[in-house]
Image (tube, helix red, strand yellow):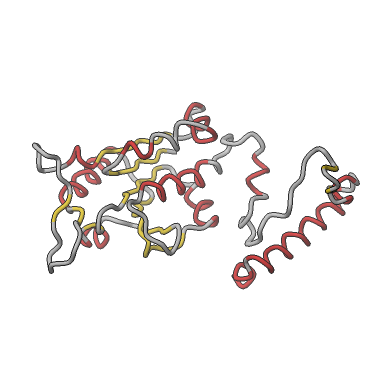
Amino acid sequence: MRIDIITVLPELLESPFSCSIIKRAIDKHLVEIHVQNLRDFSTDKRHHRVDDYPFGGEAGMVMQIEPIYAAINQLKSERNYDEIIFTSPDGELFSQKEANSLSLKENLLILCGHYKGIDHRVREHLITKELSIGDYVLTGGEMPAAIMTDAIVRLLPGAIGDEQSALSDSFQDNLLAPPVYTRPAEFNGWKVPDILLSGNEKKINEWQLEQSLERTKKLRPNLLKD
C-alpha cells in the first residue's frame, strides 16, 4: 500500500509515522507513506503562498485551487489512486468499517485542509471521499490524516504481531471490546474475573460477548441500532 498526504505543515506528520506500529510497517515494506508539501506546488515562487482571501468578504483565508490541482495532478500522473480523501469536519464520520475498507486499497491520497477551508471547486471536482474524525474543528487536517492512516495501516497483514488481535478490536462488529486483564490475578484486593482464569474457552468467549454487549448498551447504545 502507498499513502500520500498533501499538507502545508509536513513537520506535523513526522512524529506519528516515525515510531511504533506505523514505523514497523514501513520498515517491513508493508506501506509507503509520503508526505507532500503543498507549498512546493505554489504558483508564488517567491513566498510559496497557497492561500488567499475568500470571495464574499468572509473572515479567514482559503486554500487556493491552483497548488492543490497541481499537486494532485502530478501524483495522479505517477499512479492511480483508489481514493482521494479530504479531511473535513463536515465529511462522513470515519469509522472502523471505513478503515477496514480502505486497508484493502492499493493507493490512497489524503488532502489536509487548513485555514478557513479549501476552494470548494477542489471538493466538487477532485475529491472522491470526504472524511471527518468528529463533530469539532481543528486547526488543520494533519492530525485527522495521521489518525486515519494509523487506523488503516495497523490492519495490514503483518503490521501487528498478532493479526487476530485487530479482529477483536472495538467496533469491528459494532460492539465495544470486552474488559481485558493481565497478571497479577489479584492486586490491592482487586481480582480478575474467575471465568478468565478457568481455561474454558467456550465459557470465556460467552463471557466476553456478554461483556461487549453490556458495555456497548451502557456506553454506546447507538452502535446497537446500527
Q: Count all numbered tags in the image, as a single digit.
A: 0
Taking the view exactly as shown, the residue that stands out farthest to the top is 27
Q: Position of residue 167 (x, y in %)?
A: 65, 48
Taking the view exactly as shown, the residue that stands out farthest to the front is 188
Q: Position of residue 211 (x, y in %)?
A: 76, 60
Q: Position of residue 128 (x, y in %)?
A: 34, 57
Quadrant of the image containing the N terminus: top left
The residue under the point 37% across, 65% down is 90
Give 138 or 105, whichever is nearer the viewer. Answer: 138
Depicted 56 relative to depicted 67: above or below: below
32 lies left or right of 219: left
Quadrant of the image containing the C terminus: bottom right
204 lies left or right of 116: right
Q: Position of residue 86 (x, y in %)?
A: 34, 54
The residue under the point 67% across, 64% down is 216
Taking the view exactly as shown, the residue that stands out farthest to the bottom is 225
56 lies left or right of 95: left
Q: Quadrant of residue 156?
A: top right
The residue under the point 31% across, 40% down is 79
